[in-house]
Amino acid sequence: MLYDRWRQVAHDFQNEIALHDLAANQRWTFSQLASLTEAAEKPCGPIAFPEEASALFIFSVLRAWRFGQIVFPLDAGKAPPALTAFPPNCAHLKMTSASTGEARMVAFTAEQLAADARNIVSTMGLEPDSPNVGVISLSHSYGFSNLILPLLLHGIPLALAGSALPENVRRAGENFRSITLPAVPALWRAWLGADAIPKNVRLAISAGAPLPIELESAVFEKCGVKIHNFYGASECGGIAYDRSQQPRTDATLVGEPMDGVQLGLDENGCLEVCSDAVGETYWPVPNPAIGQGRFVTSDLAEIRDGKIFLVGRSGDQINVAGRKVSPEIIEAALLTHPEVSDALVFGIPSDDADRSEEIVACVAIHGRTTPELLKQFLLAKLPAWKVPREWWFVESLQANVRGKRSRLEWRQNYLRNRAAADTRFFKR
């Protein structure tokens, strides 16, 4: 099904440029990509493992589709898992980002992959005359769905920038009349600081991590570029998208449901996704959270006037003496402080028998504020029991290779450093 669709796209756009490898100064038309795929030798084994390696990634996917292999994208240098059995009709395997726990494999049929691409192209209005610039990982769900599938199933050209360095992004902008630029918040912040956001960005997208309000507004004010927040999951592809043309004023707002997606809340207040793009199953161990076109996320949400607001994660809520608090509420309050550039909040086991957990705030600052001053600042905005007792000042709260910030990873790092009596820690 996927390869047949690709052949139709290659025929319809045959003389148009499909793929630019800007680092290698190479480009291919749709017809040339089709010819190279038809001339490829039959690969060995039931699975293809395309890695992050410029245009070779796209060639590997097309060859797999032609010969009926399952596609399982991998991070560069990562060893393929040992798999001996697969779900029926499996065409694609994804590895989840592990931002909420252990990474798991998700199986997809060809129809489910195609539905995600259709929803993205329709919702975002991707157009052939505004190529996608590839700076995010092609092997992760975000990059594969926003860059690879629109190219191969809808004829949206792709320009691989080589890396996300500011000079590469500037150069990518100079090669085209207009571009679509999907990225993550950390990249948008770096490009803003380096004055590297091209003036011909027709569509700017941010996903993979929460997009800070101050960053979205700063890019809009300085560059006139509206960054559209995109929310999705490896298990189901795109979920919600901010279609507005002005910066958001509420950090919890992630957008409206994608075309082809219906959203609701389960009995626990977690967002429930119904879509033809929802994956088939976790593999090899199924889970009732996913299947038959339905996926229940771990995100606590509110739906108001057709808009989706994320208010926390069910697994991230901190239990303080029997009362629950979402770390996002504390983070949002901290980010209103003029000297706080970033913040991440989580809970750790308490030494106090009357308290289940203590609240910890990891904070990146650009001034001379102190934990005591930040505590007083929060006390004017939040109840005392929601104010962190422990503080960790860090240079930055960088995301991992998938553009995610895992509370689990930061919690583990904090506990290791605290045990080593690191002087950067401050306790209430």
Image (cartoon, rainbow, N blue to C red):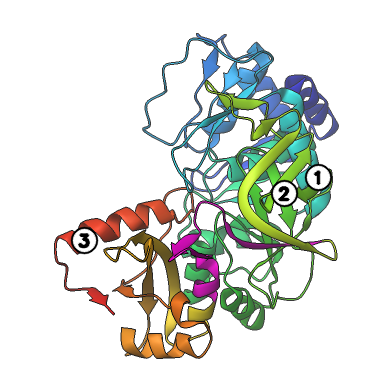
Image: magenta residue range? 307-332
Q: Nearer the viewer, residue 344 or 200?
A: 344
Amino acid type at mark 2: Ile
Q: Nearer the viewer, residue 412 or 134?
A: 412
Let me know if residue 370 appears in the view: no
The mark lying in front, picked from 3 and 1, is 3
Measure the alpha-carbon separation of dots 3 and 1.
43 Å
Question: Which residue lies most toward the left here?
Answer: 420
Question: Which residue lies most toward the front here?
Answer: 354
Q: Which residue is mark 3?
A: 417
Q: Which mark is residue 261?
A: 1
Amino acid type at mark 3: Asn
Q: Could you say whether the residue bearing mark 3 is in a helix, strand or loop?
A: helix
Please rate how many residues cluster around mark 3, counting C-alpha atoms within 10 Å: few if below 14, some from 14 to 19, many from 20. Answer: some
Q: Is residue 318 magenta?
A: yes
Residue at the image position 59 percent from the left and 66 percent from the top: 211
Residue 114: horizontal and vertical position, in percent? Answer: 76, 32
Q: Which mark is residue 239?
A: 2
Asked whether the residues under the numbered discs 1 and 2 touch, taking CB atoms below 8 Å apart as contact, a structural biologist would say yes
Q: Is residue 335 above or below residue 289?
A: below
